[in-house]
Image (cartoon, grey):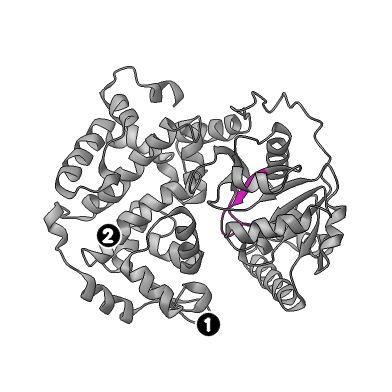
Amino acid sequence: MNNLDEETKNYIFDAINSSSKWKLPTTGESFDNVYDEIPTIKTVGVIGGGTMGAGIAIALSNSVYKVILVEIDDKFLNDAKNRIKILLNREKEYKRLNEDNFKKIVENISYTVDFKLLSEADLVIEAVFECMQTKKKLFEKLKPILKKNCIVGSNTSSLDIDELANSIKPFNFVGIHFFNPSHVVKTIEIVYGNTTKGVSVAVGFEISARMNKYPILVKTCPGFLFNRLLFVYIGIVSELINTYGLYPSKIDEIFKKFGFLMGPLTMCDMNGLDVMDNVSREVNFKLNELEKWLVNKGDYGRKTGRGYYIYSKKGKKMNNKEVEEKINSLKSKNIEEVGLINDKDIVEFVLFPYINEIFKCLEDGIVSNFSHIDLIILVGLGWPLKTGGPVRWAKNQIGLKKIVEKLVYWYSKYQHPSYKVCDFLYKEAMSDQSTIKKII
């Protein structure tokens, strides 16, 4: 942040400040007007000690909360303990964690396979497998255990909040979507549905603030905000690989040069192709041929040592020649056929439909403010910080009219639905009195 110009820095700080002043459209409740009594949160139950659950437990215990981490059996519980130990040692190695914090986290987390101990929890966050039926089955198990005013949260990244909320009635429920790695990334989606109450949202925002994270209020939809946009981003990148034969290393290099903290394929390997496969089934997002091939082989990314790249035992990333050979066999067109001559063309080919989807999200009421989208993408995706975020980049550095013109051209040539300009983007691009100016 220190290297940013004052205007960009102030824009980001204003986004952080305004995002905390939430208002729930369905009930009219807000950060300073919640209808129900907000419970005091002292003890948080975290169900599931996998990649996400372990990170969530660390983040909570490093703030002010006692954490009860629950697993289904001793093997999974021991795996969770070891996972947290590895993560904590890594944080110390990176000097993001001092000795006092290390001890605090260790002391604040208790481990158990006894679900009945969750009766002590003021808030429970489930971080189990991303499957609707699995989560519903868990909620049935929790109903007779939890105390009456316990808030139930889900770390789901894509599942319908209303359907989940209905399965845990009469408990108050809210989506609390952490980003991977959840003890590091400083943004959270607080996801509401038709029956979400202000008290649940207030608790989500409170624990986020205690963990020094930036919560954004998001309306439920397939993928919520971040993953809905991510599906477009990765979907177009997949076209570059499967249709036009670009290697992962080339694509990642282009986006790193543009300023992203991490290339899109490195990110996929970090998140896990198995996770992507499971989410895609839930939200009807189709994997491409290369992704299906990798998943069928069990090459899920960093966690298995092989994915788009190969990883050494020490985590060093290397190009995967087998993947590159597979890409050569899948290639059906030359990239020049759609006018992609240089790196700048490729960046625009991927990011312009991403901008279009952002405007669709505003059009659909998924979020209420452009700057909140910029904030979550800056922090969650590692978008180039100096631009202030995707909307600010589109408006100030590119121009919305240029984006619309390019999208219209690509849609006529390519007929991909992501390139079909949404009404809101078109109106904003053609308007002299843009609402973006008012917001930015």
Q: Is residue 166 left or right of residue 274?
A: right
Q: Position of residue 234 (x, y in %)?
A: 37, 56
- Residue 143 drawn at (x, y percent): 79, 52
* Tag 1 secondary structure: loop
**Disc 2 residue crowd, few under 14, some 14–19, many 20+, Cα 10 Å:** some
Residue lying at 66% horizontally and 44% vertically, measured from the top left:
166
Going from N to C along the chain, the mark reached first, 2 or 1, is 2
Magenta residue check for 178: yes
Is residue 122 rendered to the left or right of residue 277?
Answer: right
147, 374: nearer the viewer: 147
Q: Quadrant of residue 370?
A: top left
Q: Examine the rendered structure and indicate whether residue 239 appears above or below residue 402.
A: below
Give the residue type at disc 2: Glu
Q: Amino acid at mark 1?
A: Lys
**x, y percent for residue 397:** 31, 36
Residue 239: assigned label = 2
Mark 2 vs 1: CB contact within 8 A: no
Residue 189 can be seen in this image: no
Q: Is residue 255 visible?
A: yes
Looking at the image, which residue sits at the far top? 433
Q: Residue at x 23, y 71 (%)?
A: 330
Give the residue at mark 1: 313
Tell me the SS state at disc 2. Answer: helix
Question: In the rendered view, would you say 165 is above or below 136?
Answer: above
The segment highlighted magenta reads 174-185
